[in-house]
Amino acid sequence: MAPEHPDLVIRNGLLVTASETFHSDLLIRAGKISAVGQGINADGAVEIDARGLLVMPGGIDSHVHLQYPQGPHRVVSSDDWLTGTVAAAHGGTTTVIDFVEALPDQTWMEAFEARLAEAAPQAVIDYGFHMAFNRVDDRSLREVKSIIEAGISSFKIYMAYEGIRLEDDGILRALEQLKACGALPLVHAENHALIRYLTRVHHAAGHTEVRWHPHAHPAAGEAEATYRLLTLAAQLDIPVHIAHVSAAQVVDVMHAFRARGQQVSGEVCPQHLLLTEVLYDQPDELAMRYVMAPPLRSAADNAALWQALHEGLLDCVVTDHCPFTLAQKRGARRTPEFRRMPDGSVQAMEPESPWAERTPSFDQVPGGVPGIETRLPLLYHFGVRTGRLSLPRVVECTSTAVARRFGLYPRKGSLMPGADADLVLLDPERSITLSATTLHQNCDYTPFEGWTVTGWPRMVLSRGEVIVRDGQFIGRPGRGEYLKRAPYAFATHC
Amino acid sequence: MAPEHPDLVIRNGLLVTASETFHSDLLIRAGKISAVGQGINADGAVEIDARGLLVMPGGIDSHVHLQYPQGPHRVVSSDDWLTGTVAAAHGGTTTVIDFVEALPDQTWMEAFEARLAEAAPQAVIDYGFHMAFNRVDDRSLREVKSIIEAGISSFKIYMAYEGIRLEDDGILRALEQLKACGALPLVHAENHALIRYLTRVHHAAGHTEVRWHPHAHPAAGEAEATYRLLTLAAQLDIPVHIAHVSAAQVVDVMHAFRARGQQVSGEVCPQHLLLTEVLYDQPDELAMRYVMAPPLRSAADNAALWQALHEGLLDCVVTDHCPFTLAQKRGARRTPEFRRMPDGSVQAMEPESPWAERTPSFDQVPGGVPGIETRLPLLYHFGVRTGRLSLPRVVECTSTAVARRFGLYPRKGSLMPGADADLVLLDPERSITLSATTLHQNCDYTPFEGWTVTGWPRMVLSRGEVIVRDGQFIGRPGRGEYLKRAPYAFATHC
Amino acid sequence: MAPEHPDLVIRNGLLVTASETFHSDLLIRAGKISAVGQGINADGAVEIDARGLLVMPGGIDSHVHLQYPQGPHRVVSSDDWLTGTVAAAHGGTTTVIDFVEALPDQTWMEAFEARLAEAAPQAVIDYGFHMAFNRVDDRSLREVKSIIEAGISSFKIYMAYEGIRLEDDGILRALEQLKACGALPLVHAENHALIRYLTRVHHAAGHTEVRWHPHAHPAAGEAEATYRLLTLAAQLDIPVHIAHVSAAQVVDVMHAFRARGQQVSGEVCPQHLLLTEVLYDQPDELAMRYVMAPPLRSAADNAALWQALHEGLLDCVVTDHCPFTLAQKRGARRTPEFRRMPDGSVQAMEPESPWAERTPSFDQVPGGVPGIETRLPLLYHFGVRTGRLSLPRVVECTSTAVARRFGLYPRKGSLMPGADADLVLLDPERSITLSATTLHQNCDYTPFEGWTVTGWPRMVLSRGEVIVRDGQFIGRPGRGEYLKRAPYAFATHC
Amino acid sequence: MAPEHPDLVIRNGLLVTASETFHSDLLIRAGKISAVGQGINADGAVEIDARGLLVMPGGIDSHVHLQYPQGPHRVVSSDDWLTGTVAAAHGGTTTVIDFVEALPDQTWMEAFEARLAEAAPQAVIDYGFHMAFNRVDDRSLREVKSIIEAGISSFKIYMAYEGIRLEDDGILRALEQLKACGALPLVHAENHALIRYLTRVHHAAGHTEVRWHPHAHPAAGEAEATYRLLTLAAQLDIPVHIAHVSAAQVVDVMHAFRARGQQVSGEVCPQHLLLTEVLYDQPDELAMRYVMAPPLRSAADNAALWQALHEGLLDCVVTDHCPFTLAQKRGARRTPEFRRMPDGSVQAMEPESPWAERTPSFDQVPGGVPGIETRLPLLYHFGVRTGRLSLPRVVECTSTAVARRFGLYPRKGSLMPGADADLVLLDPERSITLSATTLHQNCDYTPFEGWTVTGWPRMVLSRGEVIVRDGQFIGRPGRGEYLKRAPYAFATHC
């Protein structure tokens, strides 16, 4: 009887770890990496020829929002757990970490269980969760421990956004509890009052078009919130992780605190590395595609973020994938208007009463961009091919450092024996022109429409199973496993 | 007939690379790492049980001075190629890079050949050289290319020290030529005029005791020279490597230039991480042991250097091993007064006419400290055990980053298939009390006399051959090979 | 009939302005400076010989708390308008700016009128007020304009302290209104939540002694609040004034924002220049004397503040005079236990029921120190005589810059024709040993007890009237006038 | 018999000092300011009505080059002591400090006497000298003391320029001697080797046009030299003055050293505040007008210099006036081709053999721009009228701070009694269009050709004598006096 999982040998590839590149074969047994070596002798194994390909640990995207009901209207992000994880796999990501946000009438544990129930039948890659620390009361503080025991070892703190944000005193109590339990705070750092104030000022001036969006979210407010958060964290001597750093001034703040010994890691998104605020200076129908928080910044900020990523002042690259269709952005629907199937076909959804005849005010546009599929190719093309990042650095910031920071290492983020055989075989010479019509994200636009990138996955494996081959998804819904994550470890660069 | 090199399998160790730690076996074949994997099946292989041990790439010490005739009196450092490399091996270092300094009547190539002839019959581990760029003229500029072809891809530039230092215009011409040839400048950055001036001032005041040594080498002068060198290098857009960074102000300068995009790496020595200038405030007989340039600095500098090493603002840890015996320090001999044999026995040397009745003026004391044997244990004990550095970071800064920076990667600095099987099996629980009487360095003092460190090599392999086992050197003189080094590659953190 | 105010000529003094020192006579006519010149011919004028004296504009202390009911228990600071202004005059201060804090049931205008009614019959020097912006609602926002018209052109914003503090959104609305009206925000910058949190933590640990006071008010929290405030102010492009800067990190934050063009001035108190937190490390009975917020900091902070004052990164020196007697500090009385009369005699007050048998918890000790009388002598002795500050710089930061910043210039802060003849004739050689028993402040301790300073006022004039001569106060209660202040002007250094 | 100098009263002006503005009369007696006061009664005095005018201390321009033989070809700057000082007077400058540069065969004293002999019969305003510290040997070190006694209390040190520059060891010996004698170093800070190297590189590439001039003088090289100089000065604890700061990076370096307590002042020129390097990107005939060292920089540098001047990080505004006619710039003459007389008429000069058919290589163009006449109007127009500087700050940085820094205070730089009556009566509403044809500088171009500025002197007095009235010069050649300057005093901001 044939084993369920025959051994696999990947031969002749260039293996890339977070610190090295070397030619070697790689043996997979029972879904795990068993050996790396030259001329591995493996009778009966299936052979994969990776000549000319880069063999890298599968990407870990620790900041995604699938099937996410955002804001007071609970507009649902257009990728569900199936389409979103399929798209991720196409782009070389084999693990995602999404969020649990409890409703007022749910305990955190109930919310987690509901979220897990959504994901389990759909996900095609492994997944975990951060818990949104959206309230500070005796009940929630008590729940921290059981949530960690359930495998959620990091907690999202919002410094902005009505309904979920914490004030400084709440942050302090949350940090105190997280420190006591060894869990990691993950922080959305923007000054809430400033956003509200500027939004009000612009509204009063009749400035409701999307071009005013970045004016309500200045980089200074992001730097301020970061300075404040790090001040509080330093008092409690707890490590923190700063979400979606978008501006040079934020990096400066992080560096100043690091120099004083504070443990702080930071993540950056491809959109903040590659796009600028000039894109808001367009008619709403175009500009609304880039509504997100923090918003796009200047070209100087782009450059500073690349430099910080190169130097290790930023540690992780994530996507903050949070797609809404153009109709959703426009305010015409609460749920997406179509459904993309794993085979790429599109299924029409029920019509929904339109909410809006015209684009809503900039602050009413659902915030977020799609990106779960394009992270690694963009980073390879614009990072490695331009000399901004070394190959090991790309693996470090898309996989190994993320795994380590969020308690998935050594199961994930590694090519070394014992790790899950989550792998990307990247063809460094394959050119792809990015387009919403060919990407697998369930969204009718991409911020990178029409861009050609060189470097694309030829094959993607999850726990030893080939799930994408030559652009075809060949896994099955629900094969992804829930990952219980260990409390954080703060390594050198992450 | 038994093969010369039977296969080796190292089982059950915790393997440590520059980015990861994992339990795995490791297979060595023909002196090279052949595979890492779980349960490696290797018939006929010799087995080594590494249970409880850390298996790390052998250390690379890119800054040592063996059999080095220093200064105008050509006082010879007390470790020759045999004793020095034996001591290195005991401490877990399997590769050294030393220096070639041509005499006025030698071409660089002649000097290299002479140096190679010294090393070849003695060295017990592999070795390479940096060339001292001690003159800028048509002949030397022409020689750069052939020196690189001979395997020397980095050039030492001294900004201080009569006879070997270059002025700014010489530095510019040297950097220009090195950039054209793809070679790396390695710079001793101190302001020469300031040292000379302060020495003269202190002499005039009757301040000749060693306690005045640091006053003639202020940190500000080191920072100034670094600022100047980086200014010049930035104009030519050439990467540089700063030798033995000793002060916080120097790190600040390096960071400022990095933030503007300059490629600069830096090295730090254990003595600058662990000792302070308070040691000069002793009678000459004690204080002279710490005469080196740059000198020891303050405790605040120590802390800043650890932080910089942790963050990646410094890249490599080296020793600047340059031992002189107390009699040499005292000025009583040109050559060391005894010879330590590989078996640890000591052979008396011919007497030499004493030069001095008393300690010479601080600027006449031969500069340098022994340290080739103690780097890894000190870094493990004071870095890893105190939480200042992760284990992978120790491997990165003592081996992988050094290999990469100086053109030895992937042959050296790696545990991955294809690399030379240069390995340290470190016992993390073995405690050793450091003492000149038990260390193998040919020097009658160590700056760390009496310190107990926990973490010491249990076994050291060079190209698959066990050369140190349980504190016994079992290799043979001359087994070390000369390493031709490739032109530099500037990776993320080094 | 003799005129009420005969002309006065002050001859032979060394006149000191904010930028110059020169020998000249000075003519006073009708309470105003009429001329400065050599050999002024003034028939019938009273002559004052200032040979050997420095003739300076009278000091302006823009941060004092007289008869101030502090906190929820409304413990009243021990200097009333009579004793406080008499003490100020003795020390060379001829103008004070105090605060109006409306009670919940008062309008701001009612509170101002009540405060004016307290001051008018007592004050012996001129005075003005800042309005505490202690609530943000339609009524208070509407009142801003009429308050400014009443002569109060600066508003105190507390970022900490229950009951009076504003949250970020309140600060933004307040700043918006102040900008619209041309008034200046004066900000107490500390992170409120952090103080509360740390106080709670220390209480929980049984740490209630005064030695824990600085631990609840870390410099980092002051720097954070300053960073936040400047971020918000920069968005609205409104100048701000930072009260009682106590730490190097705060100066760094201010400098960073100045370099980006933000208009920000800052004040520092003698206690933060001269005393350190080591004083808290004493038994409560001694340590409680130094309870204030921000607290005393380190010697390194002292040095940084002097340097910043020298360079112009700080602009004004004020006292934050807020005296409480030892019984009040101890919690035994709400009002001071004695009354010092203008002639120096002491009148016993009615007994009051003690509240406490022992020193209260550190956060219950009334906060503040006496200092209204010692500002100029301390600054002269420790600033000018040590070379830290020039004489003109002392005049600038104690008088001219303060006048300019707070809308009193050119009536106050000047020796030039047209200015009020508020003058100090300082004897640079007169030595005084500071002691609560000889100072005129109505407080039974001084933080500078037993210190001998050289440099003390020989004569003080207010609007041409000699009110202090050779240590005797010769004015009369109620002679001080209320000063209507103009909206701010932001000059080069203030 | 009428006195030679009748008393003068200037009535109704707005007097401006370095710290204040106030309406007052001003009495002049025997060439000195005698009194400032309201309604000064001065029988027999000549009255001047200054209603609507600003009455300011005459400008002091401490960096000019009149009749200056520059470089190896000794091309003579086109303003002699007559035309140069007449032009200065027109622009409101009543004191200049020029330079003495000894020839190889002259002692410094001989060179001073020769220079004095040139100036004495021509100068129409008072003047002093800096001595070029262009050699370090026993003779020159010995001469320092007698040069100071002759009234030269500041010494120029060139870090660049063949023939006059000092190396680091020379700088140290010079600084040591200057400190011993209490004299001030005034430093041209550029890295010499870098200029030479880059010039050679550009020549080798055929880049000889003027557009390459700034590429040979990068801001980084100016910052480097400043960092080095300040490092050396800090070791000797001697104050220094940095000449013509042109770039933001230099200001950053100065600030960093100030924060550590180093006394350093800096000057900036109008051309570096107002013009940018874009001007080099023109045909040589136009671009050569802007050849100077340091060269013009970026608009961002302009902004940073204004900010630094506002904040006090820069202290003085000077012109570095060093005019060459277009024919001289072109290389066609050694001496200027025409002579402008005090009455404005032009006298033709003897023809001179042309040296060049075409513009010389950028490094052969005589360096310098005219500006002695336009400093105050440019600063008033672009500083005060735009809100970048207050009026007192303009007086401080063009007069009072300069006087103080260079030992002329209180004789110069002041409106206070006892000071020389050197005055400018500036009409803040008078508009002038700048043009070489109407300015009095002996140069056939101005870098500000065609610019209209509002604010121009209506009257200029030197020692109580009106020398310019309504655009007419009415003084006489040779009336200027040589000023013996006292050793430096380092005041708060200068």
Image: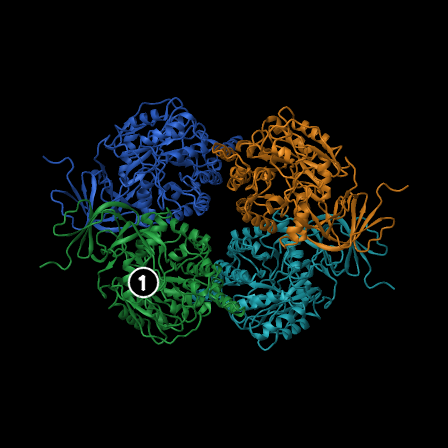
Chain colours: A orange, B cyan, C blue, D green
Q: Considering the image in quadrants, where does the C terminus of chain B appear? A: bottom right
Figure label count: 1
Give the residue drawn at x 41%, y 48%.
C303
| Chain of the residue on which disc 1 is drawn | D
Residue position marked by numbered label 1 in the rendering: D441
Above or below, B350 relative to A444 = below
Looking at the image, residue A322 sits to the left or right of residue B194; the answer is right
Looking at the image, residue A100 sits to the left or right of residue D235; the answer is right
Where residue D337 appears, as percent x and y from the top left, is 34, 70
Q: Residue furthest right?
A: A1
Q: Considering the image in quadrants, where does the N terminus of chain B appear? A: bottom right
- Of residue B213 and residue A82, the one placed in the foreground of this image is A82
Q: Residue furthest bottom?
A: B105
Where residue D241 appears, as percent x and y from the top left, is 38, 59
Q: Residues within 10 Å of mark 1 (few under 14, many from 20)?
A: many
- Does residue C401 appear in the picture of this structure? yes
Looking at the image, residue A109 sits to the left or right of residue C86; the answer is right
Where residue A142 appears, as percent x and y from the top left, is 63, 28
